[in-house]
Each structure stands twice: as structure tokens, then as C-alpha cells.
Image (cartoon, grey):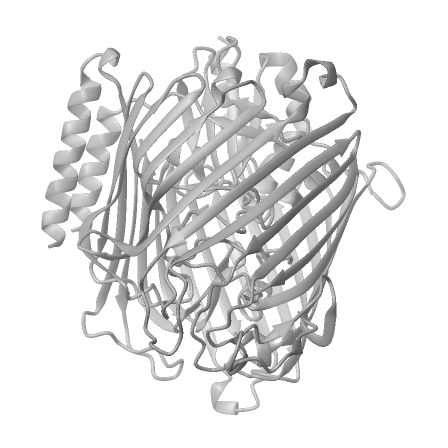
């Protein structure tokens, strides 16, 4: 199977090279490839199981062709076998994405697979997050039209990508979506020089699906959702707001009767207000979200399957290992009321506090609560289950995240950053850590980069997490040596130093090395990885513990 | 099997020339739609750097270049376009960050990855150098301290 894949890939590349080998009027071919191979070893100490196929391999190759206004492309995918922790609904080899498109100055047509997003994506976002195994591209037709300068219209219809079995498998539901956006200052010449800038948008999305696993309820076959959005800007001040609404759309929930096949309409509001100037920024966001789960099927599927909408989490995406993977937060589908505030300040250089090169400070505070729900006891009749009102929250906290980052360049060779995190995490509601109780954790990180000379540098990173709950304290250390522009090698260790169970005070050691040449990148990694949660963009996936060798190769041409 | 991948890739390196800049519309932080190709058709070199507010090496690269950017512009007339791939969860963080860090780059938003796909970017940071004729002459998919000097050397070569 693997050999077959490479023969086909080779033929594609040869075909592509033939086109480009001729002169440019024949069009342009470009593409990229990404492969990850893993060889697994059993490790009973960290609970890493040995799959019977021993190796995992995910490979993706995109080939795009462009000639004038015409574009076409395919993505060849292979899961031989699917990497451990990746959705098991991906298997085999085949074409997972193909499209043709044609664009003129004000009109564009796409046929086949495409990705798109309306506003912040709450009622429509077709996107790809390959690391998480999310791909809900729409397979159908899309038309973009700009009838006047400042007016953008989109219309599309199609089915969503769901699984992959030697090729693309779409869900049964049909998604139809339209969106319009007006840039007021571009549309009316008289407003062109206004200091107030305004953009207004609106969308309507509907789904048709007959998937139904219950005879108890009469399921709506067509469900609509709509949204309006407004962006305003006055000098350095900006505001954005978006309101979404969805009619009855019942989903099964085996765990909680209060949410099982309920017919309540969903709604959500997302607000942002910010001010920023050179060296200073302040920003506030608020969100109320209620019953906005929005899939193109109404039967039980995987948590990230067939989602039409994307509900952005109002928290900062952390990058330091312990902060990012132990207690991450994803938006609660049933509903939440969330607030976030950010402050960034750059202390000027050559000042007493700022030092010779300046110092930057970033503060972030985010919190989310369960909405106040008044249960109305109508499960035998209307099945709305409860009522809520906008921004009315209960006392039940979902998360709280306060974090500070201080960054400073000490001299031409040394850069330093210090981070502190304070988390309150309600695992009874969020259910990410499998602890099911409140978790209070603090994390400190010290990160130093020392530039030895023009090409060589060393990076040290130490992290510590303190908590009395869950798995207790953690320590993390990393040393990385880079030789610009081609090489790096890193050694890191995570140690569960405070686990109450002494046998589980395990070291997770890893060594990683890579070679980069232009857009080509090879890397090897050997060691243990703990079970954890891997998140991108507020969407998370649980990853099992593993032990073994990983090879990654990416390239584009 | 890995050998065969390598073989194909090395063949492809010799066969392919690097691509041109896609004709794609992206919003700037003011919400105005800009066409990427407009930046690469004025005869001056352009650097396109894909980054995100959650990407540490990307920010290290762009903050390092920011210290010398004025000189680069003066010497070569280069314009740096920083394309953020932050999605709607974090794209609102872009404007506060770039203002607070006093970047003088042109910043465009690619919240759903359309430009990233069109330019065949697998992971970030990925930085491209485009000559005055709109052709990619150099690219690099990583950032280690010192990489900015290689980019600067390539940039100077263009002006000779």
C-alpha cells in the first residue's frame, strides 16, 4: 500500500514537473508534502500500549495548478496506519480534497472541496486543523461576488467532509450558506475620509439532514441559523460585535437528561473593545453562548465531527508545555459566559525599568462561568428544558486563567522571559483531566536564549507546576542548541515529581533533532510522551501516552 | 520507504522553481481587503512571513527583525508583510500585539488558512523573500537566532 502511494505520488510529481518544465504559459505547479512516521514501543510504566501494527504513518501531499484565473488542486492523504491518538475514522490512502476554481476581478467560482468562514465562524466555519485531525471542508459549489466596491457576497452549498476510508467520505447532511459584508467607507465615497470606519455583515446558514436515531421525537429536518456582525473603528479605538441565533436543533445526550434532545433555540453574542497605540494595548472581550452546538447531523458523532460552527474560546492559547497541555480549555457547547482582559505594555528602552533594550509586559485574565439556567420542567411537552437571559451567569465557575509574561533583552547575547500562570479549573464540568473536581494550579516558567555567536545559540527552559489536586506537581526542563540556519538538537524531560502515588513519579524524557534547508524540514524525536490534551485554536484532542521514535518531514515547492 | 520519499523530494527540488505570489485577498487589521499581489508588483523586494500570536519562534523572528527593519528598508526598499494565521479565537489579539511591539510591518490576517494553503505553508514560522519581479527567490521554514542574517544577506544580494 505504501509503495503504491509513493508510485502515485511520484507520477504526480513527474506530471507536475512536465508542466512546469515547459514554459510558463502552461501554468504553474506548486505543492507541499508533510509526513509523520512513528515506531512504537511498549512502555508499561507510562501506560503506552503497543499497537499490533507497530508503525503509524500519516502523509499529506498537496498539488496545486494555476493558469491565469484558473486554479485546481488535490490533496493525496495516507493513514498507514493512522497515528496513535489521531481520530480512528481516518484510514487508508486516497484523495481527500480536490477542487477547481475560477476567479475574475469581481466573481469567483469554486467547485469541489473548499474552506470558508463567516465572521468569527460561530455559525459557519469550514476549516482544517491537520494536527488535530479536523477537516470539515465543504464539498460542493461556492460563488463569491463583489457587485460594487465595498460589497462582498458569498453563497455556497455542499456536504461536509466526515471520514476518510481510502478516500473522502462526506456526511449525509446538506449545508447551504450565504453571507454578505458591507464596508461602509468603501461603499459610499462621501464617507471615505471619515475617522469612523464601519463594516457590517450578516449570514444565514441552513442544514438539511434526515439522520435520526430516535423514534421518540419528531426531529426537524431543516434547521436555520443566522448572524449579524458589526465592526467599528475610531482612531485607535475599535469595537466588534457579533450576534448569532439558531432555531430548534435537538441532539442526543446520554449523560444529562437536561440536554437530551432539547428543542430550545440557541443564541450567542461575542463583544470586543480595544485600544492600542505604540507600546501599549488594552483589550476586553465578553461572550454569552447558549445551546450553540451546530452539526450537520443530529446523531452522536465524534466530538469534532461534522461541526458547522466554530465557537472560539475566550482564553489565551498557551505555548509552554505544562501550561498548554495539562489544563487547557475549550468552549463548552452547552453554554458559557466568559470574559477576557488583556494589557500589553512595552517599557521604553534606555529607561530605569526598561533597561537598555526595553522590557515588555503582558497580562491576561480570562474566566468562564456556567450560565444561570432556570429549568422549567417541560420535557413532556415543549422540551425547551430551561430559560436563560443574556450575560446572566451562575456561581459555577468553569475556568479562571490569570497569566503574566515579562520579556527582556539583557544584552546583545542574552534574552530572558518569565511567565507566571494561575489556573482554576473545574474538571467536573470541563472533564479534560479525568479528575472531575476543582483543580487549583500555579505555573512558573523561566526561558533564556543565549546567542553564542552569529550562528550558534543555546536555549534553556525550566517550568514548574504546583497543585495539590489531580496528579500533583510537575517539573519540566529543556536545553536546545541551534546552529542557524540548518540544525537543532533538544533534550527535554517532564517529571511528575508530586504524584501522590510514588510509583507514578515518572520521568518523560525526549530527544529531538532536526535539519532545515529552505522549506524542507526533517526531524527525529525519540522518547516518551505523556498522555495529555493537545489543543489548537481552542479545540482539543486527548492524546494517549506513547514511547518510541517519530520521524517528520515537511516540504513545499 | 523513507529513502524513496527523500529521493522524490530531492528530485523535486531540482525540478521546481519556487512559485509566485498568489492573487488572494486578505484583510488588514483595519478590516480593509488587500490583495497580496499588489505588494509584490512595485519593483521592490518583499518579505512575507507567516506567524501567529501563539507562535514563540515567529514572534522572536519578527521582533528581532524589527530592531533593524528601518535600516533594511532604507538600504533595500524592502517591505515586510507579516501574515497572521491566528483564527477567530486569537485574531483579535493581533492588533494589540503589533501595536504594543511597535512593529512597522504591513500585517494581514489569514484566519481560515486560505493564504497559508495557497503558498504551501505547512507550519510556521515560514518566511519568503520575493524579488522586485514578484518571484520567490528564497524561503525558510523555521527560526533560530541568526537566521535573520541569512535573510539579510539574501536581501542584499537582490540589490546587487
Comparing A421 with B145, the one in front is A421
Residue A47 seen anywhere in this rendered image of the structure? yes
Where residue A186 appears, x then y in whole percent?
64, 20
Residue at (22%, 20%) from the top-left corner?
A20
Image quadrant where one finds the C terminus of chain A: top left
Name the quadrant containing residue A74: top left
Q: Which residue extends farthest right?
A: A352
As rendered, which of A202 and A231 lies closer to the eye? A202
As drawn, A15 above or below A242: above
Q: In the rendered picture of this protein, how many numbered marks are placed on residues?
A: 0
Q: Residue at x 63, y 42 (%)?
A: A229
Q: Position of residue A515 (x, y in %)?
A: 37, 44
Q: Residue at x 56, y 69 (%)?
A: A334
Q: Quadrant of the N terminus of chain A?
A: bottom left
Which residue is more in the foreground, B39 or A119? A119
- Residue A83, image quadrant: bottom left
Q: With respect to residue A549, does A208 lie above or below?
A: above
Q: Is residue B17 above or below residue A447?
A: above
Residue A182 placement (x, y as % from top left): 60, 29
Nearest the eye: B154 or B99? B99
Amino acid at each position: 500500500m505504501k509503495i503504491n502511494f509513493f508510485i502515485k505520488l511520484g507520477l504526480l510529481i513527474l506530471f507536475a514537473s512536465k508542466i512546469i518544465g515547459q514554459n510558463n504559459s502552461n501554468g504553474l505547479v506548486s505543492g507541499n508534502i508533510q509526513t509523520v512516521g512513528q515506531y512504537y514501543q511498549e512502555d508499561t510504566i507510562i501506560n503506552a500500549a503497543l499497537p499490533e501494527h507497530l508503525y503509524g504513518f500519516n502523509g499529506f501531499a498537496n498539488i496545486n495548478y494555476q493558469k491565469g484565473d484558473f486554479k485546481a488542486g488535490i490533496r493525496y492523504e495516507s493513514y498507514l496506519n493512522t497515528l496513535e491518538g489521531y481520530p480512528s475514522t481516518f484510514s487508508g490512502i486516497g484523495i481527500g480534497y480536490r477542487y477547481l476554481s475560477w476567479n475574475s476581478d469581481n466573481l469567483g467560482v469554486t467547485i469541489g472541496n473548499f474552506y470558508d468562514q463567516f465572521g468569527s465562524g460561530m455559525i459557519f466555519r469550514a476549516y482544517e486543523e491537520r494536527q488535530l485531525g479536523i477537516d470539515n471542508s465543504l464539498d460542493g459549489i461556492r460563488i463569491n461576488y463583489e457587485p460594487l466596491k465595498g460589497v462582498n457576497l458569498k453563497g455556497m452549498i455542499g456536504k461536509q467532509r466526515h471520514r476518510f476510508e481510502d478516500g473522502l467520505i462526506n456526511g449525509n447532511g446538506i449545508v447551504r450558506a450565504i453571507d454578505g459584508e458591507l464596508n461602509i467607507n468603501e461603499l459610499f465615497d462621501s464617507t471615505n475620509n471619515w475617522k469612523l470606519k464601519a463594516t457590517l455583515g450578516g449570514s444565514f446558514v441552513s442544514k438539511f439532514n434526515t439522520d435520526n436515531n430516535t423514534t421518540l421525537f419528531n426531529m426537524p429536518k431543516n434547521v436555520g441559523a443566522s448572524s449579524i456582525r458589526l465592526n467599528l473603528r475610531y482612531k485607535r479605538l475599535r469595537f466588534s460585535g457579533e450576534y448569532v441565533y439558531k432555531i430548534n436543533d435537538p441532539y442526543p445526550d446520554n449523560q444529562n437528561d437536561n440536554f437530551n434532545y432539547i428543542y430550545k433555540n440557541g443564541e450567542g453574542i461575542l463583544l470586543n473593545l480595544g485600544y492600542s497605540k505604540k507600546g501599549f494595548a488594552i483589550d476586553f472581550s465578553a461572550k454569552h453562548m447558549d445551546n450553540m452546538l451546530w452539526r450537520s447531523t443530529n446523531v452522536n458523532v465524534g466530538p469534532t465531527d461534522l461541526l458547522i460552527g466554530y465557537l472560539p474560546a475566550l482564553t489565551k492559547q498557551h505555548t509552554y508545555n505544562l501550561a498548554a497541555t495539562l489544563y487547557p480549555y475549550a468552549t463548552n457547547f452547552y453554554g458559557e459566559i466568559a470574559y477576557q482582559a488583556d494589557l500589553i505594555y512595552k517599557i521604553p528602552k534606555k529607561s530605569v525599568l526598561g533597561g537598555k533594550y526595553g522590557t515588555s509586559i503582558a497580562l491576561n485574565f480570562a474566566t468562564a462561568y456556567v450560565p444561570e439556567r432556570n429549568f422549567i420542567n417541560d420535557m413532556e411537552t415543549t422540551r425547551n428544558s430551561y430559560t436563560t437571559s443574556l450575560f446572566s451567569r451562575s456561581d459555577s465557575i468553569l475556568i479562571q486563567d490569570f497569566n503574566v509574561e515579562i520579556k527582556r533583552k539583557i544584552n546583545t547575547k542574552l534574552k530572558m522571559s518569565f511567565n507566571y500562570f494561575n489556573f482554576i479549573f473545574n474538571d467536573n464540568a470541563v472533564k479534560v483531566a479525568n479528575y472531575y473536581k476543582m483543580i487549583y494550579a500555579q505555573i512558573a516558567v523561566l526561558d533564556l536564549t543565549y546567542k553564542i555567536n552569529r550562528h550558534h545559540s543555546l536555549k534553556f527552559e525550566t517550568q514548574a507546576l504546583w497543585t495539590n489536586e489531580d496528579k500533583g506537581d510537575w517539573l519540566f526542563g529543556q536545553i536546545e542548541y541551534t546552529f542557524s540556519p540548518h540544525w537543532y538538537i533538544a533534550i527535554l524531560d517532564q517529571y511528575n515529581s508530586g504524584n501522590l502515588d510514588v510509583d507514578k513519579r515518572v520521568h518523560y524524557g525526549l530527544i529531538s533533532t532536526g535539519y532545515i534547508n529552505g522549506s524542507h524540514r526533517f526531524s527525529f524525536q525519540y522518547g516518551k510522551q505523556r498522555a495529555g490534551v493537545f489543543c489548537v485554536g481552542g479545540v482539543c484532542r486527548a492524546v494517549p501516552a506513547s514511547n518510541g521514535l517519530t520521524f517528520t518531514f515537511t516540504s513545499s515547492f | 520507504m523513507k529513502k524513496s520519499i527523500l529521493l522524490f523530494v530531492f528530485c523535486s527540488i531540482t525540478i521546481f522553481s519556487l512559485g509566485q505570489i498568489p492573487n488572494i485577498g486578505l484583510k488588514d487589521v483595519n478590516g480593509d481587503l488587500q490583495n497580496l499581489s499588489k505588494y509584490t508588483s512595485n519593483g521592490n523586494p518583499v518579505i512575507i512571513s507567516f506567524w501567529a500570536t501563539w507562535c514563540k519562534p515567529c514572534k522572536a523572528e519578527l521582533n528581532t527583525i524589527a530592531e533593524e527593519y528601518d535600516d533594511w528598508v532604507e538600504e533595500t526598499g524592502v517591505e515586510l508583510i507579516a501574515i497572521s494565521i491566528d483564527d477567530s479565537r486569537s485574531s483579535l489579539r493581533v492588533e494589540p500585539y503589533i501595536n504594543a511591539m511597535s512593529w512597522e510591518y504591513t500585517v494581514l490576517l489569514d484566519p481560515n488558512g486560505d493564504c497559508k494553503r495557497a503558498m504551501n505553508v505547512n507550519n510556521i514560522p515560514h518566511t519568503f523573500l520575493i524579488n522586485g519581479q514578484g518571484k520567490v527567490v528564497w524561503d525558510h521554514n523555521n527560526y533560530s537566532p541568526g537566521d535573520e542574517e541569512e535573510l539579510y544577506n539574501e536581501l542584499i544580494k537582490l540589490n546587487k
